[in-house]
Image: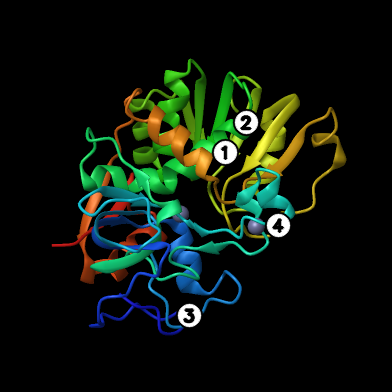
Amino acid sequence: MVLTAPGRPLKLQDRPHPEPGPEQVLIRVRACAVCRTDLHVVDGDLPDVPIPIIPGHEIVGEVIAAGAAAGVEPGQRVGVPWLGHTCGDCRYCRDNHENLCDSARFTGYQIDGGFAEMTVADHRYCFDIDPSYDDMEAAPLLCAGLIGYRSLVMAGDARRLGIYGFGAAAHIIAQLACWQGRQVYAFTRQGDERAQDFARELGAVWAGASEQPPPELLDAAIIFAPVGSLVPAALRAVRKGGVVVCGGIHMTDIPAFPYSILWGERVVRSVANLSRRDAEEFLAIAPQVPIRTRTAPYRLEQANEALEDLRQGRLSGAAVLIMD
Ligand SMILES: [Zn+2]
Ligand SMILES: [Zn+2]
């Protein structure tokens, strides 16, 4: 399913199988989850989307062929995340911040992704998936889980944790946060009873509308919804010294707000991408919790429907494309 012009529906195309380069593996895709970032790619919210491109960066598949240098075996099941390539040489790569690499390339954005039956990926960005997960259940771990995990780490040791936007990332990270003994406060669109019930079901101690103040001040808040006005809302909900983590790759403009809500050493920060260490850590923790993902299956050719359902907020959990 190919993006041929920003803002246009994806097109079903027949293509020859991609050829893996020396550092790449050829993967038969079994499942690929649909992420909000795919919407930002499709809508042209991200800069310089190369056309044509196959979206999809939460890939679970089987290695069919490995290039000469690859450390991954044919037959192995792997997960492929958003970060698809780094240079290994810039100041960020050398400094253990490969998520900020100056020359990073991203799956389903600059590298053809998983809305396809076959794809190629750099073997250094292929990860083992615990056998306790089936393909569909594992797929959302690869971005919603990984970016969620990095966001949670950035929230520090916050005991009272707010989560704004209760979609795919939130439903995964809420389970981990509860398991770690934190109290989760879930914020959703006003009147979204379904998402609020879902949050409580997963262990949230409180669920309410984003505009609503929580019953207690929070130690930290993570914003997954791409809505800039949530930044001042979250700042008002955190205590002195609290941190507001923006977990999305794209956000509408943040409205002006009084300095007094930032005062008191409150921090606003973003989280960009993921590192391989995040992937290794999170994919090891997930089966211990164990994190269970809620998924809605779609066929590959239904990718546009899946994107639209995500856009309209009709999903609880994650949409996953299943290849036959
Ligand atoms: Zn680099
Ligand atoms: Zn994503």
Alpha carbon distance from label 3 to label 4 = 31 Å
> In the depicted view, which residue is nearer to us: 259 or 140?
140
Say which mark, if any, is on residue 151.
Answer: 1
> In the depicted view, which residue is nearer to us: 79 or 181?
79
Does 3 sit above or below residue 274?
below
**SS label for mark 1:** helix
Q: Badge 2: how crowded within 10 Å, few (<14), some, or many (20+)?
A: many
Label 1, ligand 2: CB separation under 8 Å: no
For mark 4, what is the residue? 90
Q: What amino acid type is highlighted by mark number 4?
A: Cys
Alpha carbon distance from label 2 to label 1 = 6 Å
Alpha carbon distance from label 2 to label 3 = 34 Å
Work out whether mark 2 precedes mark 4 in sequence or the reverse, and give the earlier one.
4
Residue in the picture at 38% in, 45% down: 127
Alpha carbon distance from label 4 to label 1 = 24 Å
Say which mark, if any, is on residue 155.
Answer: 2
